[in-house]
Image: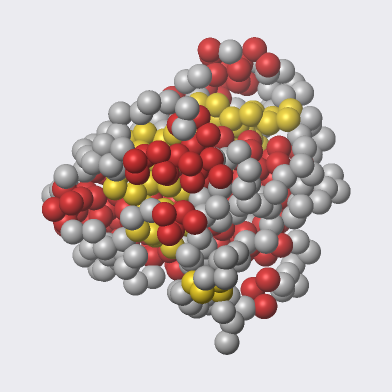
Amino acid sequence: GAEVSTLDGVTVKSKVVHVDWDVAQAQKGGFPHFMLKEIHESPDAVANAMRGRLTDDGAVTFREFDVPDDRLRSITDVLLLGMGTSLHAAMIGEHVIEDWVGIPARAEDASEFRYRRPTVGDHTLNVVITQSGETADTLVALHQAKERGSLSVAVTNVIASSAARDADGAIYLHSGPEIGVASTKTLLAHMISLYLLAVRLATVDGRVSLERRRELVEALRALPDQVRGILARDKEIVELAHKYSGYRNFMFAGRGLDYPVALEGALKLKEISYIHAEGTSGGLLKHGPIALLDEQFPVVAICTASSTKDKMVSNVHEIVARSAPVLALVTEGDHSLDGVATDIFRMPAVEEAASAVLNTVMLQLFAYHVAVKLGQNVDQPRNLAKTVTVE
């Protein structure tokens, strides 16, 4: 067998880890691009993130992050670290943890966290979010938080990666290989994993009722089929993408959970189509971004059912008053933007956390089809790498 040794010739005992990936998973499987194949693998990615972790009564267990209830009860705040798409996942995690668990949570850009003196300690749960488990800035931030005594968990797709080894535990996505540079299915798996973590924290603290846990279980288990429902409407999304592919500037706007979804929608579009796109919260529009809007600057407005939906509808009226085209995502049965938005894409009526997942899938497909229409290399965008291992 193989032998591993140091440069000095000292034999090192290495732990053998079996990874359940095969060659077929790393092939396109009839799709024109890995990115589209991986978007279509999202239902399985969502299901795999839940498999074996969620009971009918909403009890959550993580085999590689098996922390006693007493230790979790001692957690008074949560720090979520990520970069790029993983930062957007962290922002979604921040929202659901504060909402469901009722303790302070904050999402941080890992590359900026390392240069500060954060107030973290043994009362802090540090959640590092990295698809590869090797993102350089995220690893440095993980080490700094650990030095201050925080409990740490890596949410990653790669078994035995640096983040998984260095953290106190790991929540593996089990999404299979993601070849396309732009993260798609792994973002959804990150979101589901963070939802489960929030349920786990809320349960040990007694902050979520059995009835509410059962509601969440029902909503989460319905997601794979609901994602398939969005994928089945690909032709509608192609038509919208082609209609909007001639614009050179975009704005994406959302509130609450859909604010990071809007940021991610803008990131995906700029990554693979090279079109300038920026994300903003609906409330922030009037504080600067609205000055950019005109008939050549469309806005993708996420207006699906939520506690902030009426505010977003008001934002759309403000946008239309500036002559900007609006593509609005609205919940089926909601006609508040009929005749107001330029185009409307109707989404299923689901739990708000589930809606964020479905909205993300729609925006991934929209970005993909815009980029393909423009003839771009969606799997390997210029100047980007799948894993950023330098600081």
Q: Dividing the image into 4 quarters, which one contains the N terminus?
A: bottom right
Camera-side residue of 183 and 99: 183
Q: Closest to the observer: 215 or 87?
A: 87
Indicate the position of residue 29 as horizontal and vertical percent values: 72, 73
20 left or right, relative to 145: right
Q: How many marks?
A: 0
Considering the image in quadrants, where does the C terminus appear?
top right
x, y (%) of residue 185? 56, 58
Q: Position of residue 233 (x, y in %)?
A: 63, 57
Name the residue at the right extreme: 375
Indicate the colouring scheme: secondary structure
Q: Could you tell me residue 337's position as x and y percent?
A: 54, 32
Q: Would you say residue 331 is visible in this rendering?
A: no
Q: Quadrant of residue 370?
A: top right
For the point 44% across and 58% down, which residue is it?
A: 164
Residues 229 and 98: in front is 98
Instruction: Evaluate whether residue 168 shows in this view.
Output: yes
The residue at the point 63 percent across, 21 percent down is 320
Q: In the displayed structure, would residue 202 be above or below residue 314?
A: below
Q: Is residue 198 left or right of residue 249?
A: left
Q: Residue at horizontal 71%, vertical 62%?
A: 34
Whether 149 is drawn above or below 119: the answer is below
* Left or right of 184, for residue 128: left
Classify residue 184 as left or right of residue 225. right
Vertical position of residue 82 compared to residue 234: above or below? above
**Residue at 51% across / 74% down in the picture?**
11
Q: Residue pushed farthest bottom?
A: 1
